[in-house]
Image (cartoon, rainbow, N blue to C red):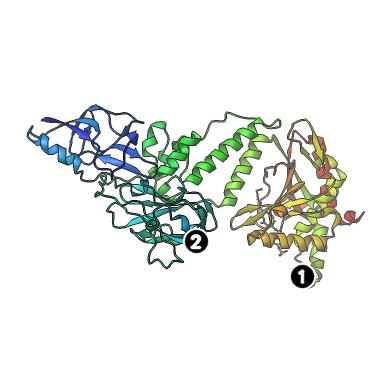
Amino acid sequence: MSNMTVTVPDIGGAEDVEIIEINVAVGDSVEQEQDLLVLETDKATMEVPCPQAGKITAILVKVGDKVSEGSAIFELETDAAPAAEEKSEPAVAEPPAAAEKPAAEEKPAAPSASAAGQIIELTIPDLGGADEVTVIEIAAKAGDDVAEDDSLIVLESDKASMDIPAPQAGVLKEILVNVDDKVKEGDVYARILVSGGAAAPAEQAEEKPAGAEKAAAAPAPAADKPAAAPAQSNTQTLNEVTDEKDIHNVYAGPSSRRLARQLGVNLTRVKGTGMRGRITKDDIRDYVKAVVKQAESGAVGVTGGAGIPAVPAVDFSQFGDIELEKMSKIKKVTAANMSRAWLNVPHVTQFDEADISDLDEFRKSMKAEAEKQGVKLTPLPFLIKAAAASLVAEPSFNVSLHHDGEHIVHKHYVHIGIACDTPNGLMVPVLRDADKKGIYQIAREVNELIEKARNGKLKPNEMQGGCFTISSLGAIGGTGFTPIVNTPEVAIMGVSKAQIKPVWNGKEFVPRNMLPLTVSYDHRAINGADCGRFFTHFVALMKDVRRLVL
Ligand code: CAO
């Protein structure tokens, strides 16, 4: 049994490096090479491993302390004979695997003043002895204006992650590596058009036009062999991160951690979308945007319902095999819109059926003619036309709530949204002035909008300004559903599959083609009687489309 003082190993010459995590407590039994604490510089995180197995008897530092090579950090009781105590010194001084030297922490030297206006190649700096490392994040793209020190790419070895910063401000011309690429010191990873003229050792970043063999925007050479930390997976799935105390398990690079600190973001609450769930700077920004948006929507007069408890995170892998699929942007936006509408709008859904026997007969009789004109005549254009006419007849439906919560916005235009199922998710293109258009024109324009939606070609203005949405699952099936109001609209129609049903005509049951319909509305803006009038009018138009021309 002997005691030894564990000191900070060679960290590549970095001074006053901050302790960001302490992973052990007094009394803990530790293995050789187990992570004891994590250091972080501006550009790199480093794990400091235990030089040999034993028991922690004292922790001599705390999170936030600044340390350098040789700083005492722990007292360790080991099983080794006292004589071995001397041996413990080299174990620390020559750690088996302390964090890789934070090569990127040493700022890559800026190109020479004469490089201003020139395109230079940026190379992977000294990796502190690591042969090859993986590119795990591309933090900028061609065309970006980057400031000096902005992170361009992030590299990761088994033991450490490193931001590779821009040596000087400029316009990024090209990134020559991809995520997952393996790189080594000296590899060219980007080309940058230097904007400033800050003087710096010219040899650090030679100008390409000058015919340099190899640009070297590398940081100062690492004098020492890096210490590598013990192997430890930093992989952290979202579901595992549930508590503040998990902060040291959060998988994020130094620049992300720094940004989180600057913005006061608790990283355990941020979902990582990078490789293996790594939290990127964009994830932090998205998190902040979402929080701000949520806070703002809660402050608007017509909304409410704050303080809804979050659904607890679940690690589904404990129940069986799973795989994570990244949601498309559209699906994420839809999810946010749906939650917002569901939480803010007091919904009422009314049900009815329209007898479309005559309409369907007429439609089918016109199909061939329509096709000659390049128009696909489904029930949808008739539904749109009838909805537009009903909005004109019942203007109480053609409104929105003003965000001040004190006004109703009456619309003197009739634009109809069409919920459209696309490979990327649900989109709602908007047909403008539907009340002023004939069935063929509506059919043609709607088909164009649907095609654009499915090809991802819709422009933002083609998805804006709707007064009322029609969501048709008629081609798929079902007898009815309760659609969610597409805010800031106040009503939406759900169309299900038409079926021949026996209908009592006063004397006998006759087979009629009945179309099941629902209308969900925002009860703050619309009352049941308004909906009754609107819906009855709509159903009457569908039963006898001749009324549409009246
Ligand atoms: N009852 C019976 N048949 C119907 C019908 C209905 N209500 N609606 C459409 N059909 C028929 C059409 O007539 C067509 O058959 P024919 O070619 O023989 O005439 C066939 O079904 C296919 O129609 P379609 O789907 O190509 O075209 P559409 O105009 O009916 O619908 C669109 C277009 C964009 C609304 C639809 O394709 C779609 O994406 N719907 C999904 C909407 C959605 O996901 N909503 C979200 C639900 S939650 O709010």
Foreground residue, 418 or 278? 278
| Spatial separation of the CA atoms under disc 1 and disc 2 | 55 Å
Question: Secondary structure beneath disc 1?
Answer: loop
The mark tally for this picture is 2
Name the residue furthest bottom. Answer: 372
Amino acid type for the residue under numbered disc 1: Gly
Amino acid type for the residue under numbered disc 2: Gln
Residue 508 makes an appearance in the image: no
| 342 sits left or right of 492 in the view | left
> Height in image: 255 above or below 111?
above
- Rendered location of residue 131, percent (x, y): 28, 57
Mark 1 / mark 2, whichever is N-terminal:
2
Give the residue at mark 2. 118
Q: Residues within 10 Å of mark 1 (few under 14, many from 20)?
A: few
Foreground residue, 356 or 332? 332
| 294 sits left or right of 193 in the view | right
Q: Quadrant of residue 257?
A: top left
- Rendered location of residue 56, percent (x, y): 21, 30
Question: Secondary structure beneath disc 2?
Answer: loop
Foreground residue, 411 or 60? 60
Q: Residue at x 52, y 33 (%)?
A: 310
| 409 sits left or right of 130 in the view | right
Give the residue at mark 1. 374
- Rendered location of residue 91, percent (x, y): 17, 41
Q: Quadrant of residue 370?
A: bottom right
Contact check, label 1 and label 2, Cβ < 8 Å:
no
Name the residue furthest right. Answer: 550
Residue 303 makes an appearance in the image: yes
Image quarter for ligand 1 equals: bottom right
Q: Quadrant of the N terminus?
A: top left
